[in-house]
Image (tube, helix red, strand yellow):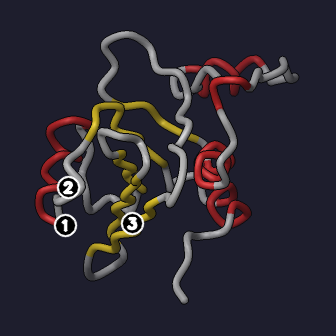
């Protein structure tokens, strides 16, 4: 069975970024239409090796598109009951970057809107560089 990469492997590889399209996506979209949405909505290269997450209008389905060396992989999850609870997104944003742990929480059914990130120590130089990619919870 092929599963998502482990959190440990994603956290170690800084190049693997995770992008969530905040607008609902037609779940009938396949590889090519999702790749085009990556370009149009998220503004990234679909062959970059990053993970691109799309949700259904009802919120009970997610698709994750990723390029794997010589072709696209597509993960599709449909919930039998309930909806995926996604992080809060700023007004007008069409996409948001997630951490691997945030994606794992979404997939595990944790309501991200009820979480609060507590302050942590960050070195001055590193903190400024990463704040541009920070996702508020």
**Alpha carbon separation for disc pair 2 and 3:** 12 Å
Circle 2 sits on which residue?
34
| Residue 122 location, quadrant | top right
- Residue position marked by numbered label 1 in the rendering: 31
Task: Name the spot of residue 68 as percent of width and height, x first.
Answer: 36, 75
How packed is label 2: few (under 14 Cα within 10 Å), some, or many (20 or more)?
many
**Position of residue 111 measured from the top left corner of the image (x, y, whole percent):** 66, 35
Q: Secondary structure at mark 1?
A: helix
Number of the label disc, if any, that sits on residue 76: 3
Q: Nearer the viewer, residue 20 or 9?
A: 20
Mark 1, mark 3: which one is toward the viewer?
A: 3
Sequence order check, earlier mark of 1 and 3: 1
Quarter of the view holding residue 4: bottom right
Residue in the picture at 40% in, 53% down: 61
Q: Secondary structure at mark 2?
A: helix
Residue at the top extreme of this rendering = 91
Disc 1/disc 3 C-alpha distance (Å): 12 Å
Name the residue nearer the viewer: 35 or 112: 112
Front position in the image: 49 or 128: 49
**Which residue is most to the bottom?**
1
State yes or no: discs 2 and 1 in contact (Cβ < 8 Å).
yes
């Amino acid at each position: 069975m092929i599963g998502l990469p482990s959190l440990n492997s994603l956290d170690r590889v800084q190049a693997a970024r995770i992008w969530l399209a905040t607008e609902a996506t037609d779940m009938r979209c396949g590889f090519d239409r999702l790749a085009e949405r990556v370009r149009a909505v998220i503004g990234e290269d679909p062959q970059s090796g990053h993970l691109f997450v799309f949700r259904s209008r009802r919120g009970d389905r997610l698709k994750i598109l990723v390029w794997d060396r010589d072709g696209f992989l597509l993960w599709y999850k449909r919930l039998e009951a309930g909806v995926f609870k996604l992080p809060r997104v700023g007004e007008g944003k069409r996409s948001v970057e997630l951490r691997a742990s945030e994606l794992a929480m979404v997939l595990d059914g944790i309501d991200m809107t009820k979480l609060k990130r507590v302050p942590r120590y960050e070195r001055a130089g590193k903190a400024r560089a990463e704040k541009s990619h920070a996702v508020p919870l």
